[in-house]
Image (cartoon, rainbow, N blue to C red):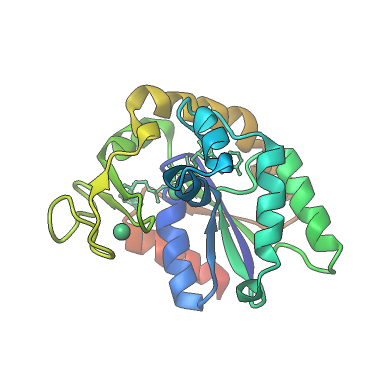
Amino acid sequence: MKIIMLGAPGAGKGTQAKRIAEKFGIPHISTGDIFRANIKNGTELGNKAKVYMDQGLLVPDELVVDLVVDRLKQADCEKGYILDGFPRTIPQAEALDAALLAIGEKVDYAINVEVADNYIVERMSGRRACLNCGATYHLVNIPTKVEGICDVCGSEIVLREDDKPETVLKRLEVYHDQTQPLIDYYNKQGILKEVDGRKTMSDTFEDILKILD
Ligand code: AP5
Ligand code: MG
Ligand code: ZN
């Protein structure tokens, strides 16, 4: 089962991807999480990516594609995986298709989590993220058990640097310009599925399960 999560920043791709991964026992691969882990560890890749991420811009394709293609070769990806935040541009999608074609495989579903722009900024300002384990919460919708502390690993949760309102607006602009064309790209391949991301987390998850069944 090879699944791609599409959707605007803050649509709930990560939230849903984690639940799907848990349910089906396949890895959740988030390029945003990979970059954030690299930034935290001060790697060369992290230092390069941070410059773009802090401005709400996409990291250049050449820093992303090989990273993901290598990740997909690891043993835990044999039964499938969920890609969250990748591909994000047409060249990334083409590179993924080419890498899969070379081993006789293809993407099964591209699930687009649909949320209108006006709800996005509101959601993002309430999001809190654990930079240690990648878990995400929302101050109102999905609070932690202990205020300010990650339920999973006990680290402090923070407002992501790129979740400040002005950066969110830039990310939305970049999304419409560079990522939204992927909806059409996967629709033409006949594998696009749309879900309403404005429902509750659980209702959206149910809709996704109906598609995957
Ligand atoms: P990335 O980390 O992928 O960020 P993003 O796509 O902008 O998406 P988010 O993670 O912000 O949102 P999400 O859809 O996962 O929403 P979430 O589930 O958290 O990328 C960050 C940056 O890295 C990019 O800007 C770029 O610079 C770089 N990058 C990454 N991949 C790249 C690539 N392939 N190419 C180039 N650059 C790349 O939910 C949001 C909030 O809403 C949470 O608080 C959540 O709790 C809450 N919520 C979720 N669902 C619901 C619901 N149903 N009801 C109420 N609240 C909900
Ligand atoms: Mg995410
Ligand atoms: Zn954590």
Q: Along the horizontal axis of the image, is 18 left or right of 154?
A: right
Residue 152's image quarter? bottom left
Report whether 176 appears left or right of 16. right
Q: Position of residue 208 (x, y in %)?
A: 49, 64
The C terminus lies in which quarter of the figure?
bottom right
Q: Residue 59, relative to residue 198: is it above or below?
A: above
Q: Quadrant of ligand 1?
A: top left
- Residue 27 figure quarter: bottom right
Residue at (55, 48) in percent of width and height:
85
The answer to whether residue 181 is above or below residue 208 is above
Residue 105: image location, x then y, percent: 79, 68
Give how far across and how far down residue 20 sits, in percent: 47, 68
**Looking at this view, is 196 or 186 the one in front?**
186
Q: In this rendering, is residue 176 above or below 133?
A: above
The residue lying furthest to the left in this view is 146
Q: Quadrant of the N terminus?
A: bottom right
Give the number of marks: 0
User: Which residue: 70% across, 47% down?
Assistant: 65
Q: Nearer the viewer, residue 132 or 25?
A: 132
Residue visible at 42% across and 32% down?
117
- Using residue 65 as the reference point, say whether residue 139 is left or right of it: left
Q: Could you say which is closer to the camera, residue 181 or residue 169? A: 169
Q: Position of residue 4 (x, y in %)?
A: 60, 57
